[in-house]
Amino acid sequence: MSYTNVRGTEHYYEWIKKPSDSEDKPVMVFIHGWAGSCGYWQGTAHALSEQFDCLLYDLRGFGRSYGQPSVAKASESVVESIELESPQAESVAIQKLTYELEEYTDDLAALLDKLHIQRVYIAAHSMGASIATLFLNRYPQRVKKAILTCSGIFEYDEKAFTTFHKFGGYVVKFRPKWLDKIPFVDRMFMARFLHRSIPAAERRAFLQDFLKADYDAALGTIFTSVSKAAAELMPQEFAQLSVSTLLVAGEYDKIIPAQMGRQAAALNDKVEFVMIPNTAHFPMLEDAPTYLKRVQEFLQ
């Protein structure tokens, strides 16, 4: 469990490794979704740690990673991932960080540079899978294979998007810290995301991650990941993929329906589509054995 400075903000990361005869095991990086943390990837990472050194990290503004620094903090930061001529220039650079998904791809590239990792496998989920897709096209030489879970393409609908942004803004704003003290609230919170039940401890962890997500990051990524620009961009990104990719969907996913994933995979022969029956937005938790079987088949 460690922190490192990435483009001016402190990022939390951790390794899950197992001893191996090989001195040079490949690295698999795990990217979580909106308002989550790397914590929900731990089970999958442990299951794959015989084959991979697994790197888990929290996206900027989520989990245990910091959001955008204030101006006061920025003047004290040391941005080790880029060369700047003065503290003033450094402060300006940090203030220019946005919550565009492309910025998160640059965060990942900088993190890998800091850890001296050249090439990786990627496992990403939901919004994290959108970030991973952009990363695959911007840094194809750095990825061997990718697994995108609960991702896809969608059509722009101005009325629906406006309603979603309004509702999302309200949800992000109204997050009282005492919410997780209400009995069974974790079950209600996760109901829309699941088809099968998961342990109560995992449900509570999701709720706690949501409650502590940085306000600007949580709101900013709602507008950048679900937007007219994203609806126009993502089909192009899937069509351009040159990295071998597995796209996994949950049969009953209400957040990103399986059909959206199927449509994305149809754009590119490099993308293999798999649907996990009787799961929704977290197939890696709802049916871990089937999910891991599909992933292992792809990796082999």
Image (cartoon, helix red, strand yellow):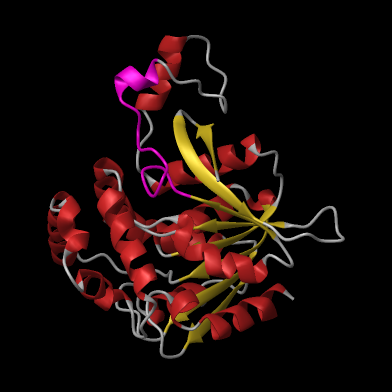
x and y percentages locating residue 230 in the rendered image: 35, 56
SS majority, magenta: loop
**Residue 262 location (% of width, % of height):** 46, 80
Q: Is residue 73 magenta?
A: yes
Residue displayed at 39% across by 49% down: 63
Residue 100 horizontal side relative to residue 115, left or right: left
In front: 14, or 239? Answer: 14
Q: Position of residue 287 (x, y in %)?
A: 48, 84
Residue 18, how many percent across, how many down? 73, 61
Does residue 223 appear anywhere in the picture? Answer: no
Compared to 211, does 263 lie above or below? below
Whether residue 160 is visible, yes or no, is: yes
Residue located 53% across and 73% down the image: 247
Residue for point 25% across, 77% down: 191
**Is residue 212 shown above or below 49?**
above
41 shown above or below 262: above
- Is residue 281 rendered magenta in the image? no
Q: Is residue 300 above or below residue 97?
A: below
Query: Which residue is located at x 57 percent, y 37 percent?
Result: 110
Q: Which residues are magenta?
A: 58-75
Q: Quadrant of the C terminus?
A: bottom right
Task: Please tell me in which quadrant of the rendered image residue 44 appears.
Answer: bottom right
